[in-house]
Image: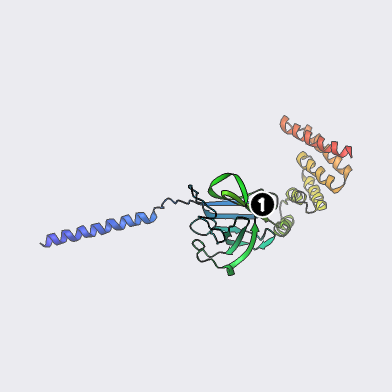
């Protein structure tokens, strides 16, 4: 009898251990989601933008005005509230948003959407949403798509040196939200610090930043001249120096730089690169000589 009880006890213990092992295995198994998680990373100037969200699909359902009701706060995704982060301050549709991580809520309607940047609360859905924690609200107009988008897609598109568009796209609509970076506030302090640091200084890259972002053409010319001191026969740098001097209004200097670039390129081995800069410089010289 004692042996019977002992065997039964061992059997029960074995069952419990087996269940425990199964539960442990289940706890480490990540179940496939009907709305998979996605991340988007994008850099604009020196600003990093990151989106983390879950992507529901339409699956034949009517989305806006039904699954996603009009006039109500939506998590802008599925499962946990969608998150967006900015590594520096940005402007969204003309409204300032400080650096940080936010929950991205929206209030869809037929004619316009309210897009909300809300303090990060790590909440599920929008059930605990409270407008007192809103950091910024902007209004965006939905754009009708020529082809429906089956799965919700958040993307950062139409990049320039200091702008981008956050697109919220699903079913029949795309909702564009403008993002602008103040490069004078976010880039220039770091750039000037790098130009004063010990060691190799980024004169060329700094000159192109001032030129391409139309910040200060005189400073761009000064920095490119400094860059050319150590590489006086660099035909790519000389070509760009001619562009800077042209914008500055120094026609003679621009012609001289373009001619030096062409001459230096002609002495460079390799047909493709030589021909490319010969063509580029001829375009500049033709433009300058026709003025």
| Left or right for 171, reference 11 | right
Res. 118 in view = yes
| Left or right for 291, reference 71 | right
| Left or right for 246, reference 236 | right
Residue most extreme to the top: 271
What residue is shown with label 1?
A: 164
Residue most extreme to the bottom: 132
User: Where is 197 relative to 259, above or below?
Assistant: below
The residue lying toward the viewer, choosing from 80 and 14, is 80
The residue lying toward the viewer, choosing from 115 and 113, is 113
Label count reads 1
Locate residue 108, reporting x and y percent: 58, 57
Residue most extreme to the left: 1
| Left or right for 23, reference 219 | left
The quarter in which the N terminus is drawn is bottom left
Give the colour scheme of this rendering: rainbow
Task: Name which residue lies at 79% across and 35% down.
Answer: 264
Asked which quadrant contains residue 9, the reply is bottom left
Locate residue 254, reporting x and y percent: 85, 42
Q: Secondary structure at mark 1?
A: strand
Locate residue 134, reporting x and y percent: 60, 66
- Mark 1 is surrounded, within 10 Å at the Cα level, by few (under 14), some (14 to 19) or many (20 or more) other residues, namely many
Res. 270 in view = no
Locate residue 128, reporting x and y percent: 51, 66
Asked which quadrant contains residue 2, the reply is bottom left
The quarter in which the C terminus is drawn is top right
Task: Name which residue lies at 23% across and 60% down.
Answer: 13
The residue lying toward the viewer, choosing from 11 and 131, is 131
The residue lying toward the viewer, choosing from 147 and 50, is 147
């Amino acid at each position: 009898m004692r042996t019977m009880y002992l065997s039964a006890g061992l059997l029960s213990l074995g069952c419990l251990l087996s269940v425990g092992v199964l539960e442990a295995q289940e706890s480490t198994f990540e179940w496939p989601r009907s709305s998979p998680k996605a991340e988007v990373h994008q850099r604009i100037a020196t600003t990093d933008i990151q989106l983390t969200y879950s992507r529901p699909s339409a699956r034949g359902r009517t989305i806006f005005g039904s699954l996603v009701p009009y006039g109500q706060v939506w998590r802008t995704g599925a499962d946990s509230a969608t998150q967006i982060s900015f590594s520096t301050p940005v402007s969204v549709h003309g409204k300032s948003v400080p650096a940080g991580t936010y929950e991205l809520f929206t209030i869809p309607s037929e004619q316009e959407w309210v897009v909300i940047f809300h303090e990060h609360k790590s909440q599920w859905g929008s059930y605990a949403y409270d407008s007192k924690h809103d950091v910024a609200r902007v209004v965006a107009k939905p754009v009708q798509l020529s082809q429906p988008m089956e799965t919700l897609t958040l993307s950062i598109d139409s990049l320039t040196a200091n702008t981008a568009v956050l697109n919220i796209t699903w079913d029949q609509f795309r909702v564009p939200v403008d993002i602008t970076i103040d490069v004078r506030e976010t880039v220039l302090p770091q750039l000037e610090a790098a130009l004063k640091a010990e060691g190799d200084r980024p004169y060329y890259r700094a000159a192109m930043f001032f030129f391409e972002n139309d910040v200060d053409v005189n400073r761009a010319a000064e920095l490119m001249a400094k860059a050319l001191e150590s590489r006086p026969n660099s035909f790519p740098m000389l070509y760009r120096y001619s562009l800077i001097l042209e914008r500055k209004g120094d026609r003679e200097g621009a012609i001289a730089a373009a001619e030096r670039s062409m001459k230096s390129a002609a002495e460079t081995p390799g047909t493709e690169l030589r021909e490319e800069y010969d063509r580029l410089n001829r375009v500049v010289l033709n433009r300058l000589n026709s003025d």
